[in-house]
Image (cartoon, grey):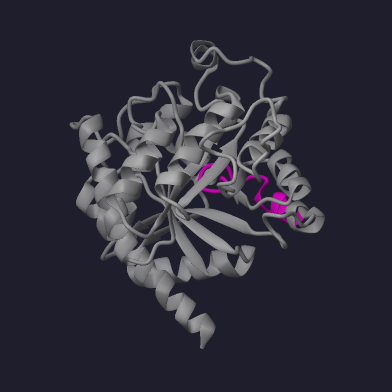
Amino acid sequence: MRYSVLDLAPVPEGHDAATAIGNTVDLARHAEGWGYYRYWLAEHHNMPGIASAATAILIGHVANATRTIRVGAGGVMLPNHAPLSIAEQFGTLATIFPGRIDLGLGRAPGGDMAVARALRRSMDQGEGFPNDVVELMTYVGPPRPEAPVRALPGEGTHVPIWILGSSLYGAQLAAHLGLPYAFASHFAPAALEQAVHLYRRDFRPSPQLERPHFMLAVNVFAADTDEEGAYLRSTMQLAFARLRLGRPGKLPRPVREVDAEIGPQVRAAVDEALRITAVGSPETVERQLAALIETYAPDELILTGQIHDHQARLKSFRIAAEVLAQLRESAAA
C-alpha cells in the first residue's frame, strides 16, 4: 500500500513563511528518500500559520527540489479559480515534471467569505463545483484542436484528478465521475464510514480509473516514547482549538498540559475531530496505524502532522515511514 505526505507548509511561532517553505522542501526531500509516494500541498488563504496559499507555485518549487516523488495539490479549492486557469497551471507543471503531478480538487473556500470576495469568484457556495470539475477534466484530456478554448499547456497531459471531501457530497461526485477519492479524515471524520461505503458502492469506471481508489488521511505524531508523541501532538490540538475559536495564528509551541490552555470541553471536541490519529512510540504508532488500515481498508494512506519543531517533524515522518514499510512487508509475506 502506498503512503504519502500532506503538508500545509506550517509557519511555526517564532518563524516566518520563508522558514516554512524551506522546511517544506527539506521534508519533501527526506520523504522521497523514505519511500513516500506523493507529496501534497493544500490551498489555504488568510492564515498566518500556513504558507501554501499559492499552491501551484509551491508545488513547482517542491517538484524542482526532488526527483521522483509525485507532487500535487491536496487540494486546490476549485470554486476560487476558473477551471481553465487551473488546467493551464497544472498542465504547465505536468509538462515540466511529466508523470509526477497530481491535482486534488475541493469545493471548500479555503478561507472565509471575505477571502472569497477578495478572490473575486462566485459566491455560489460551490454549487457549480461538479460542472467546473468536468470542464477542467476536458481541458487536460485528449487534444481538441476544434475547441474554441483550449488549455495550452494542459490538453493531452491527463493530469490525474482526485476529488477531496469530508462529506457524502464528494464521495458521490467521485463515484459518479470515476475518480479517486481522498477523505479529510484527519480533521473531519464524522462521515468517514458512510462516505467510503457510498463511494465504493456507487463507483462507475472511467477512462482514468477502473475501480474505486480511496485515500485515508491520518495525523501522525511519532517519537521515541508515547509521552513525547503526546507532547508533539499538543501543537495541533492548540492550533485546531484556536482556529475553531476564531483565533488562527502561527503554529503553536507544544505544551505538557493541553487542558490548561484550552479547557477540557474544547479539548474533547478537538480530540474527536482529530480522532484519526496515530501518536506515540514506534510500537504504539504501528499498532494504531494497523488498526486504522484494518478498519477502513484504504487503498492508500496520506499522513500529516502539524509539529512545531522541524527536526521532530522529520523524525515523526521517518518513524511513520519505517512503520508503514514494515506493515507492508508483513502484509505481503
Residue at 78%, 46% (x, y): give it: 176
94 versus 10 height, above or below: below
Image coordinates for residue 310, horizontal then vertical, percent? 23, 48
Q: Is residue 196 covered in magenta?
A: yes
Q: Is residue 124 covered in magenta?
A: no
Residue at 32%, 57% (x, y): give it: 67
Q: Is residue 33 left or right of residue 56?
A: left
Total residue callouts: 0
Provide the residue span drawn in magenta. 183-197
145 versus 186 height, above or below: above
Q: Is residue 243 left or right of residue 312?
A: right
Residue at 30%, 50% (x, y): give it: 232
- Whether residue 178 appears in this view of the structure is yes
327 versus 112 height, above or below: below
- Whether residue 258 appears in this view of the structure is no
Q: Is residue 302 left or right of residue 252?
A: right
